[in-house]
Amino acid sequence: MSRLYPLWLRALVSNPVTPTEIARRIVSMETLPQGRWLESDDMSRAIATALVAHPDPQIRMRMTENQRLPQDISGRLAEDVDAGVRKKYARNAALADTVLSREAVTRMADDPDPTIRRYAGGLPGPFDDIRVRLAEDPDPAVRAAVVSHETVWIMLRPAVRERLLVDPDPAVERAIRAFVRARTRLPRSLVEFRAEADPSRRERVVTGGTLDRDLAEALTLDPDASIRARVAGNEHLPADLARRLGLDPDATVRLVASMHAELSEEERAAIDYVVPEGRQPIARWVRAASDTPDALRRAATSAHVLLRRSAASLRQLPPDVVELLARDDDTYVRLMLAHHCDDAPHQLLVDMYAHDSHLSWAMIKSRPNFVVPGLAHYADHPNERLRQIALMDPDAGPELVERLSHDSDVRVRQEAAGDARLPLGQLVELLYDEETASFAAANSALPVEYMHQLLDQAGVPPLRL
C-alpha cells in the first residue's frame, strides 16, 4: 500500500476542493513528495497559498517556476523576504512572457535589486507608466530594458529623452540604436538591401517585405535555394517571378512558388511539385486573408492541398468554408480544422478524436463544439477513446459513471475515477487501485474526512493545536 501514498499526496495537491486544513497538513510534512510537481502541477488555492509562504526558501524558489498558479497567489513571490526567490520569480516571469498583476510588477519595479527592476521593465502588459519611471532608473541595465518600448519613448518627458540619447552606457546606447533601427523602413531596393547590415531585417525583407522589382529579381536568382524558397512565399513577390520560381531546379522552391496567391489553378497544376508527408508551413497570404471570405473560399476550393490546409488553420472561417473543409479527403485538412477552427463541427471533432494518431489527439476534446448532450451513447462503443468521452456527457448519471469505472481500458477507468458523479463507495474502492488512485484522490467529490484518512494512512502527522 505504501506505493499509493505518493499518488494520494500528489492528487490531493491538485484536487480543486482541497481545503486549508488538508493543505496545512501536507505542507507541514518534513519531506514533501518527490518529483517536479511544485514546478508544474495544477494546485488547489489552499495548497498554492500555503506553499508560496513555506518556511523553506528552496520550496518557494521551486514555486517560482510554476506557471499554473493563480496570478494573485504567485504575485506574493514578488515580495518574498528572500532576494533569491524574488529574482528567480522575476526571471521566470520574463522568460515565459507572463502577464503579471499590476501589484506584482509595481513591487518588482520598486525592488532594491536592479536585476529584478530590469526584469520588471521587460514584462508584457499595460504598464507603460511603470516603464516610464524605470527609464530614469540609476542602473543603466534597467534603463536599457525599457527605452526600446515605442509607447514609453513617446511618453517620456523631452528632458529625459535628451538625457537617454546621450547616455554614455553602452547597453543604453545599443538599446536606443535598436529602437531607432526597428522604426526605420525595411529595405525595398537592391541597393538598400545590400547596404542593410542587420541579418534579422534582411530576413524580414526576404520573407515578407515589400520588394522593388530589382530586389525581387535578384532574390529569385540568388544561388542559395533557401533564400529563393523564402522569397517564393513572400506575398509581395510579383506573379511572373513566382511563375519563374515554379520552374526552379529545387523542389522546395517549386512547392512554395506553387502556393503564390496570384497563380491560377491551371498555373499551379503546371508546376512540378510534391507535397512531403506531414505538416507543412501555411501560405502567408491565406493567413492575411482571415477577414476576406472570397480569398478563403478560393483557398478552400483549391486543388492545392497546402492552400486548403492553410485555410483550415484559421480560427474563424465562413460557415460554407467550414462545411467544405470538414468533408475534405485530406486527413491534415480535417485535422487542422479540428484543432484550430472554433466552428469545427461536432462530428468531425469526434471522428478525429477517435482515430487521430498524432500526439495532440487528446487536445481535440477541449474544442468548443466537442461536448454536447448525448455523448453517453458511446458508452458501449468498441473504441476505448469514445467510451471515455461518454463520461463527458453533461447529462450522464452516476450509474453510467460507475459502470465505466469497471471498463476494460485503464484510461476509461481513470476518467471515471475522477468524475464527481461517481458513487462514493466506488470512489473509495478506486483509491486503493494503483492505476486509479491518483484520479480518485483528485476527485472533487472526495469528502474532507476521507482526505484526512488518506493522510493518516500515509503517515502524515496531524496538525498541532
Image: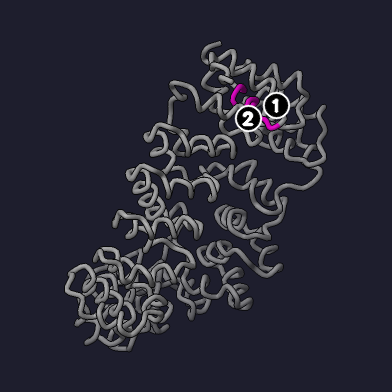
Q: Nearer the viewer, residue 395 or 139?
A: 139
Q: Nearer the viewer, residue 303 or 142?
A: 142
Please give the name of the residue rendered at 34% of the width and 59% of the height, measured from the top-left corner. Answer: 117
Residue type at mark 1: give it.
Answer: Leu
4 left or right of 401? left
Image quarter for residue 219? bottom left
**Coloring applied to the structure:** one colour
Q: CA distance from mark 1 to mark 2?
A: 8 Å
Image quarter for residue 55? top left
The secondary element bearing badge 1 is classed as loop
168 left or right of 351? left
Q: Is residue 438 magenta?
A: yes
Q: List x then y, in percent, for residue 380.
A: 76, 30
Image quarter for residue 166? bottom left
Q: List x then y, in percent, for residue 245.
A: 35, 75
Q: Are marks 1 and 2 in contact (CB under 8 Å)?
A: yes
Residue type at mark 2: give it.
Answer: Ala
Give, as a single range, the part of the protein colored magenta.
436-444
Residue 217 position (above or below residue 199): below
State the residue lying farthest toward the front. 465
Looking at the figure, which quarter contains the C terminus?
Answer: top right
Residue receiving disc 1: 446
Q: Is residue 82 magenta?
A: no
Q: Is residue 247 visible?
A: no
Looking at the figure, which quarter contains the N terminus?
Answer: top right
Residue receiving disc 2: 442
Please give the name of the residue rendered at 42% of the width and 48% of the height, measured from the top-left corner. Answer: 79
169 left or right of 326? left
State the residue lying farthest toward the top. 1
33 left or right of 122? right
Please give the name of the residue rendered at 61% of the width and 32% of the height, measured from the top-left corner. Answer: 20
